[in-house]
Amino acid sequence: MGKRIVLHVGAMKSGTSYLQTLLMDNKARLAEHGVVVPGARWGDQVAGVSHVLERQKVMRKPGEDAWQSLVDEVQAHDGTSVISMEFLGPVGLPKIEKVRDSFDGMRVEAVITARDLGRNIPAMWQEFVKNGGTTSLERYVEKVRARGGGRPVLARAEHRRHGPSLVRRARPRRGDRGDGAEAGCAGGGAVEAVRPDPGGRPGCGRPAGQVQRVAGAPRRSRWSAA
């Protein structure tokens, strides 16, 4: 298959933390099957992605080589690598292209875990309140409806003064077969959506199994959660 990087780009509150825990807890087992999860810990991926996206609001300022160290580890591996960070989802085309161009000569694929909005919106509101927001759930939902304006494709949260901008409209380019800007940069058909189970429990194993398949790890290799 050659060098390949799989970017798990969110969306937020769709079981991402569960999958990230599985990836880091099973680094050695995945490596046995030719799948590299770069970074000594998941925080290294957070720092690297924060650096390449030039995020200003970060708990800890990443080092200047935070992103490049991940890229170097990926480039040194002749196979599949996986980076999972939901900050990669709600960004504009120039930054998506910057991430893609970091992996020159490699196949770049994106995986999106997408939870239905009936569960995603309350979960985002809870996260908003946890981080100091005071908007009621009813007002939060009103703002989502007011800003949606059309077909919801990717979910994101921008905790602004007057409420969130949760629904983002994708703008597919001519010839794209995936969804939105990520598809345009990763290449048509290189975007895969993974949905948590209908019961709304992202830790049930279905998303993990689908991401495991995309990454190329044999299904008989059971992942373990610490």
Image (cartoon, rainbow, N blue to C red):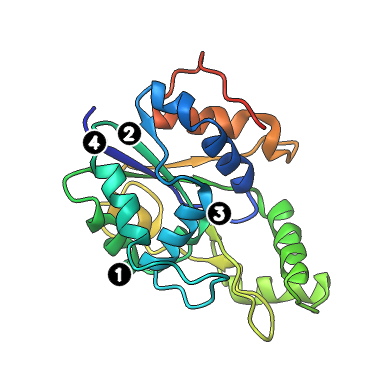
Q: Residue at x 34, y 25 (%)?
A: 34
**Number of residues whose C-alpha sits closer than 10 Å to that of mark 2, classed few (under 14), some (14–19) or many (20 or more):** many
Q: Name the residue under label 2.
A: 80
Residue 54 figure quarter: bottom left
- Verify CB contact (< 8 Å) between mark 3 and mark 2: no
- Give the number of the disc on residue 94: 1
Position in image of residue 52 (x %, y %): 36, 65
Name the one closer to the observer, 20 or 60.
60
Q: Residue at x 72, y 64 (%)?
A: 127
Q: Mark 3 points at which residue?
A: 11
- Verify CB contact (< 8 Å) between mark 2 and mark 1: no
* Quarter of the rendering occupied by the N terminus: top left
Q: Which of marks 4 and 3 is in front?
A: 4
**Number of residues whose C-alpha sits closer than 10 Å to that of mark 3, classed few (under 14), some (14–19) or many (20 or more):** many
Q: Which amino acid does label 2 sit on?
A: Thr
- Compared across the picture, whether 180 is left or right of 101 comes to right
Q: Disc count in the image?
A: 4
Rendered view: 209 above or below 188: above
Q: What residue type is labelled 4?
A: Lys
Q: Which of marks 3 and 2 is in front?
A: 2
**Number of residues whose C-alpha sits closer than 10 Å to that of mark 1, classed few (under 14), some (14–19) or many (20 or more):** few
- Give the number of the disc on residue 3: 4
- Verify CB contact (< 8 Å) between mark 4 and mark 3: no
Looking at the image, tell me whether mark 4 or mark 1 is earlier in sequence order. Answer: 4
